């Protein structure tokens, strides 16, 4: 779908679409003193939708935001980094509601019109007084020029801010979509990602927001993995200000399809940024499985490969160990015929008809030394295909996660 439209870069990240403001401040939650609280807001309650973690240990902010988004309208999102407010029981629920109330009072809206998100260490009580003070400060600093500050304020182990905005024209109208995300570890979203927020000035109804977001998530955030771990706090929210003007976009119209394509484009770019910034990652890996009986089978096999610690270590070591790929496909549950399996590392066919091809190990090692690698598996049993993005496991991954709480 995205290939049918031409996108242009837009300045301003999450605030590039008309009708949105943002701010990021330091409330002293992060030990570094860097920004750790932000607000993304519209000038009124606007249509919105969200998708959340499938984890059964979902954090209080997720539970509160699910509740508040049930009505399909939001005025703002209040976010803190440095503390996940997860596995914190009834006090954590009270703290999440306090975040929504603080933002609502500062903005002059109802708490139910505010979504809340937290990210950081799990199982530690939220320093709610600091967070609330940060929310009040951020609300007073809202502006169209603060996208960079907001992007910084949601980071944890991220090494760079993840944001972009694009615009496109359809039916004589120009729509803009902006996005920001954070995530580096504990990534196999199984719904969205650690945290991701997308805005558009297109006039969408709440149901349209929901349909557009879920379609985009299925092909972007739900196709990435760093370490196969689904967070307690995964959240992805889309808000549509309608500030571009004009009639509401009807499902199936050219304008609706254009905006859906732009949201998918932004979501895919953000998802890939998360993988590129995977903890300790040295390689960005595109795993494509084709020739499957069903898309579900292709996705199962692709994730089995992408999540295999042995496969990820081999990629770090520049070892075209195709046997580990065959192993992963075999355990995936996808329907296969071992005698038809084909495996291609970085353009080099290593396995054909289920057996080795006699490829050059030196040539393969050189190809795998690149920072971006394509790994293709053809099952040759059908026509379905799926692509998953992942990264390698390095020594640095172990170091980062060995002292994460230190």
Image (cartoon, helix red, strand yellow):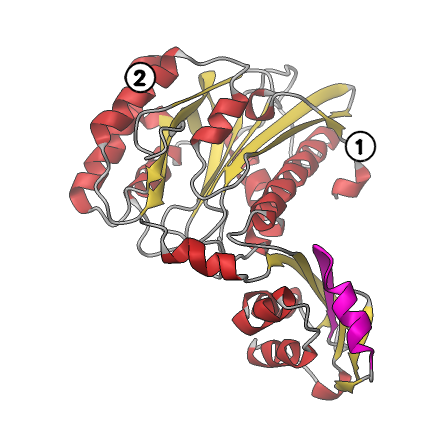
Which element carries disc 1, helix, strand or loop? loop
Q: Quadrant of residue 303?
A: bottom right
Residue drawn 82% across the image and 84% down it:
357
Q: Pointer 2: residues within 10 angstroms few (<14), some, or many (20+)?
A: many
Q: Pointer 1: residues within 10 angstroms few (<14), some, or many (20+)?
A: some
- 1 or 2: mark nearer the eye: 2
Number of marks in the image?
Answer: 2
Residue drawn 19% across the image and 35% down it:
94
Percent x, y of residue 345: 75, 69
Q: Quadrant of residue 19?
A: top right
Percent x, y of residue 174: 72, 20
Q: Relative to residue 395, is residue 30 depicted above or below?
A: above
What span is in magenta?
A: 359-378
For residue 141, side relative to residue 283 (left or right)? left
Callout 1–callout 2 Cβ contact below 8 Å: no
| 3D distance between C-alphas at marks 1 and 2 | 40 Å
Label 1 vs 2, first from the N-terminus: 1
Residue drawn 57% across the image and 69% down it:
313
Question: Residue at label 1?
Answer: 6
Quarter holding the N terminus is top right
For residue 54, side relative to residue 85 (left or right)? right
Percent x, y of residue 63: 31, 42
Which element carries disc 2, helix, strand or loop? helix
Q: Relative to residue 264, is residue 306 depicted above or below?
A: below
Residue drawn 36% across the image and 51% down it:
404
Q: Is residue 6 magenta?
A: no
- Residue 333, disc: none
Q: Quadrant of residue 116?
A: top left
Q: Is residue 366 magenta?
A: yes
- Residue 136, disc: 2
Q: Relative to residue 333, is residue 86 depicted above or below?
A: above
């Amino acid at each position: 779908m995205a290939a049918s439209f031409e996108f242009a870069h837009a300045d301003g990240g999450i605030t590039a679409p008309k009708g949105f403001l943002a701010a990021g401040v330091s409330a002293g939650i992060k030990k570094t003193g860097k920004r750790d609280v932000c607000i993304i807001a519209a000038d009124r309650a606007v249509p919105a939708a969200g998708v959340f973690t499938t984890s059964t240990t979902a954090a209080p902010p997720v539970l509160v935001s699910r509740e508040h988004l049930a009505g399909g309208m939001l005025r703002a999102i209040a976010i803190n980094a440095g503390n996940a407010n997860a596995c914190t029981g009834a006090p954590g629920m009270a703290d999440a509601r306090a975040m929504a109330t603080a933002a609502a009072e500062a903005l002059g809206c109802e708490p139910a019109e505010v979504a809340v998100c937290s990210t950081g260490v799990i199982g530690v009580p939220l320093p709610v007084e600091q967070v609330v003070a940060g929310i009040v400060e951020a609300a007073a600093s809202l502006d169209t020029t603060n996208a960079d500050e907001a992007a910084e304020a949601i980071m944890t182990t991220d090494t760079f801010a993840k944001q972009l905005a694009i615009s496109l024209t359809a039916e004589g109208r120009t729509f803009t979509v902006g996005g920001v995300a954070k995530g580096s570890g504990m990534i196999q979203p199984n719904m969205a990602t650690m945290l991701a927020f997308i805005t558009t000035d297109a006039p969408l109804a709440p149901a349209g927001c929901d349909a557009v977001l879920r379609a985009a998530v299925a092909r972007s955030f739900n196709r990435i993995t760093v370490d196969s771990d689904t967070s307690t706090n995964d959240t992805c929210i889309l808000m549509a200000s309608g500030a571009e003007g004009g009639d509401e976009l009807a499902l199936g119209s050219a304008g609706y399809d254009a905006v859906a394509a732009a949201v998918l484009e932004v979501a895919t770019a953000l998802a890939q940024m998360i993988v590129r910034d995977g903890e300790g990652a040295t390689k960005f890996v595109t795993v494509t499985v084709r020739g499957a009986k069903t898309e579900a089978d292709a996705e199962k096999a692709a994730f089995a490969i992408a999540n295999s610690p042995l496969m990820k270590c081999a990629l770090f070591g520049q070892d075209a160990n195709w046997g580990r790929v065959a192993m992963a496909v075999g355990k995936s549950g996808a329907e296969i015929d071992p005698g038809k399996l084909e495996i291609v590392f970085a353009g080099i066919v290593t396995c054909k008809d289920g057996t080795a091809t006699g490829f050059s190990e030196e040539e393969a090692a050189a190809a795998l030394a690149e920072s971006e690698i394509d790994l293709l598996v053809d099952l040759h049993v059908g026509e379905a295909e799926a692509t998953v993005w992942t990264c390698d496991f390095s020594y640095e991954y172990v170091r980062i996660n060995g002292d994460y709480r230190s």
